[in-house]
Image (tube, rainbow, N blue to C red):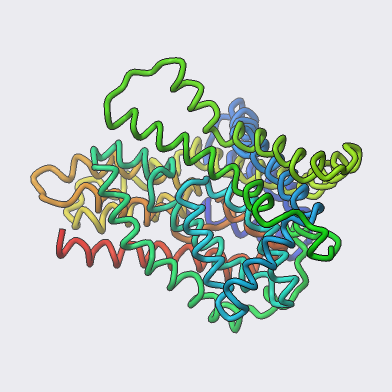
Amino acid sequence: MPLLIVALGIVLLLILIMKFNVNTFISLVVVSFVLALALGMPISEVVASIEYGLGDTLGGIALVFGLGAILGKLVADAGGAQRIAMTLINKFGEKRIQWAVVVGGFILGIALFFEVGLVLLIPIVYQIAKQLNIQFLWLGLPMVTALSVTHAFLPPSPGITVIAQQYGANVGLVLVYGIIIGIPTVIIAGPLFTKFARKMVPSAFEKEPSGSMASIGDAKEYKLEDTPSFGVSIFTSLFPVILMGISTIITLVQDTMGMSANMFFDIVAMFGAPTTVMLVSVLLAIYTMGVARKIPMSQLMKSAENSIAAIGMMLLILGAGGALKQVLIDGGVGDYVAQLFEGSTMSPIILAWLIAALLRVAQGSATVAALTTAGLVIPLMQGTDVSLELMVLATGAGSIIASHVNDTGFWIVKESFGLTMKETFATWTVLETIISVCGLVFVLFLSLFV
């Protein structure tokens, strides 16, 4: 019954947005209330659940997206994104530029959160598409594929790292196996699927970039000699990667050597947190893209204000998506799915993937789906010789399947690229499903040798 209620709630959401053209934010809040009541939540807890879900989601991403948008706009308005784009085009050529974006997204994705990688890369990808006069989504879809794969399979991404700890798996081996399955998965779900998607939903590729994040990359054209140098531009854009990379390495050394926490490690952890990273990077960009080039502070702050205005509605939509997710969690949808698999004798790898997939579709959160799956499957692994590392990857693969309206990532991609609901389902939802299925197939293949 809970799954049927969720399905009807999703249908109601689609009708409100697609048929009656109700604002997405309003539609999400209305459906959150309806689903909370339909799932039997006490009336006294409904508002608190919705407010918590919205606040929890925005608490994690609002500062990252806000500061990331300011960073991207400062680099774009100064001509830094144009300089990076032209340098990459000259280096790789138009025919290989899509692969350059994929490789860049994969490398950055290892060090960055999905959201951080997105706000850093979209302005640059926008400029590349503009300079080459090619479709924005032709480059954007493979880029988000690379970021999603690294987020799902490769430590130190928070989700997969926590799952590894739950299973007691070797994080180093998870990283090695994750790279082995991640590379072919990126190729299949990225450049290869993008060719198919362009034929399936040409409207998504033919439109002019209209998403809130795309507008951040839009800036006036400069003569190349009037833009910041490539070194300064790339250093400023990738400074978050440097900070987070240093923090990650120090933390891994601390964990490996069993060193106790102290003031130094606390400072490292603080400066490695996404919010701190983005704040320090914005301050650097104000200097490198503005003060050092004698651009008035008032002009720099105008860029900052424009960037925040561009993503205001997107943040509200992301928060409302988080509210919907929280209602489904508090309404017990995940618990209901878990009960369906009690006492199962299925292969642990397939079982972990299947439970995580159903939990993901039902309640939206990949992290909740993965952690719940680990708790359910660990007791069923007793007496088997299945690889713990492959169990981690199978759970991670299942937990990202079929991203739809109860997943914050769905709304991030939709609003970032200015897609319609139908276009987002046909591109992002299918793409995430391909990543999930490929992950399972490659994990099962690896299990023959591990």
Q: Which residue sits at x=60%, y=43%? A: 239
Q: Which residue sits at x=67%, y=38%? A: 62
Residue furthest to the top: 263
Q: Which residue sits at x=54%, y=45%? A: 241
| Residue 46 at least partly seen | no
Q: Which residue sits at x=53%, y=56%? A: 7
In the foreground, 71 or 344: 71
Q: Position of residue 135 (x, y in %)?
A: 69, 75
Residue furthest to the left: 383
Q: Is residue 315 above or below residue 198?
A: above
User: Is 174 displayed left or right of 123 in the figure?
Assistant: left
| Residue 241 at least partly seen | yes
User: Is 115 displayed left or right of 81 in the figure?
Assistant: left
Q: Position of residue 63 (x, y in %)?
A: 67, 36
Q: Position of residue 370 (x, y in %)?
A: 37, 45
The part of the image, by quadrant, that contains residue 32 is top right
User: Quadrant of the image for the C terminus?
Assistant: bottom left
In the foreground, 152 or 341: 152
Q: Position of residue 332 (x, y in %)?
A: 45, 39
The part of the image, by quadrant, that contains residue 324 is top right
Residue furthest to the bottom: 199
Total number of numbered discs in the rendering: 0
The part of the image, by quadrant, that contains residue 59 is top right
In the foreground, 237 or 269: 237
User: Is 230 displayed left or right of 102 in the figure?
Assistant: right
